[in-house]
Amino acid sequence: MTAEFIKPVIWEGDAIRLLNQQKLPGEVEYIFLKTIEDVWDSISELKVRGAPAIGIAAAYGLALWAKKNGSDDLQTLKTDLTEKSAYLNSSRPTAVNLSWALQRLLKASGEEASAEKVITRLETEAILIQQEDEETCRRIGEYGFSLLPEQATVLTHCNTGAIATSKYGTALGAFYIAKEQGADISVFATETRPVLQGARLTAWELQQAGIDVTLITDNMAAHVLRTKQIDAILVGADRITANGDTANKIGTYGLAILAKAHGIPFYIAAPLSTIDLHTATGDDIVIEERHAEEITHIAGKRIAPEGINVFNPAFDVTPHELITGIITEKGIVSGDYESGLAELFEPARI
Ligand code: MRU
């Protein structure tokens, strides 16, 4: 059975139609983004989230700005695009897909000789990024599935599904493929505090796809790993550095330690656009810190005392030595990440 996928970002030519992920699972609401500020706010407020999806949204955001406001003077347009790209890139600091997508647009459009052609190229390149991501995620899903036993029970964290990408998802892609192939797969999904991407989004997406999913709170993970015969943990990534250290949703590092303690394989699933060879190690990754209200409030209701100090990092870094393998669209890297990841970017040898 092939799952139906809901698209998080839809290009309308003069606007972006965006699935408002803040409203899920209660409501499937699409909103229209008509300005670059709308795009910045939507990324910052997590209406669109997940590393590949925010890259796609930002790419369309830049194309949208250029189409509506771009100068017909080539030099002025190029200067403005650099500035607007930096603005969009400031919406969230950790996921490298954001700057990757924007840089790709600037590089591709930089080859054009007129302002008109630059504007057209920005749009076609953004569309291409989204189209390529579909195929990329499909391959990640297939490689991920190849690692699972015939009857698999897996655990995942945060949300890495179709709505975090263009289609299929990364770690969740493996589960969709398993379902498609008629394999027997059960998933434990952590709720993922503080903003509950697991409870609100992963549980919903897997349920929609007819995949057996059981929701747990984050602090149940150790008990589940000990008692539920978990075959593997599969999660996504927001930035993978040259040595394989991986930033992903807060709580991922703890799961990797638990996986090691229980002798369970721990896999990262991510596209090449999430690999940042320019950053040497996880120590160099900027970790986004978000509003205190994400912790002091649940669904708008205060649950902690007024005036309490709060520390709210949105991501943590898992050191590469805790990672069994990194699943990409070009295959699975393990062991020596430094050379294995670099090789993924080498031109194909005949
Ligand atoms: O804060 P979020 O919801 O954007 O965090 C998302 C994650 O950490 C995902 O695991 C990651 O972006 C991979 S999405 C395929």
Image (cartoon, rainbow, N blue to C red):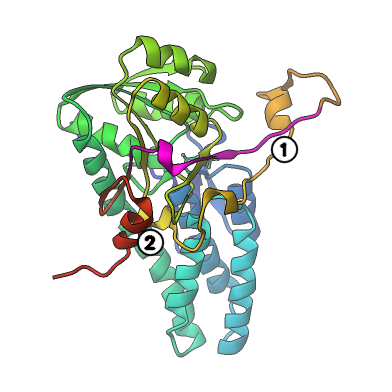
Segment tinted magenta in the rendering: 309-325
Calculate the distance from the C-alpha at mark 2 to the C-alpha at mark 1: 31 Å
SS at badge 2: helix
| Residue identifier under label 1 | 291
Quadrant position of residue 87: bottom right
Question: From this viewpoint, is residue 235 visible?
Answer: yes
Determine whether, in the image, residue 308 is placed left or right of residue 270. Answer: right
Location of residue 45 in the rendering, given as x and y in whole percent from the top left corner: 63, 43
Residue at 40% x, 27% y is: 260
Q: Which mark is residue 197?
A: none
| Three-letter amino acid code at the position of disc 2 | Ile
| Residue identifier under label 2 | 129
Residue lying furthest right in this view?
A: 307
Residue at 68% x, 40% y is: 290
Residue at 76% x, 19% y is: 304
Quadrant position of residue 133: bottom left
Determine whether, in the image, residue 206 is placed left or right of residue 116. Answer: left
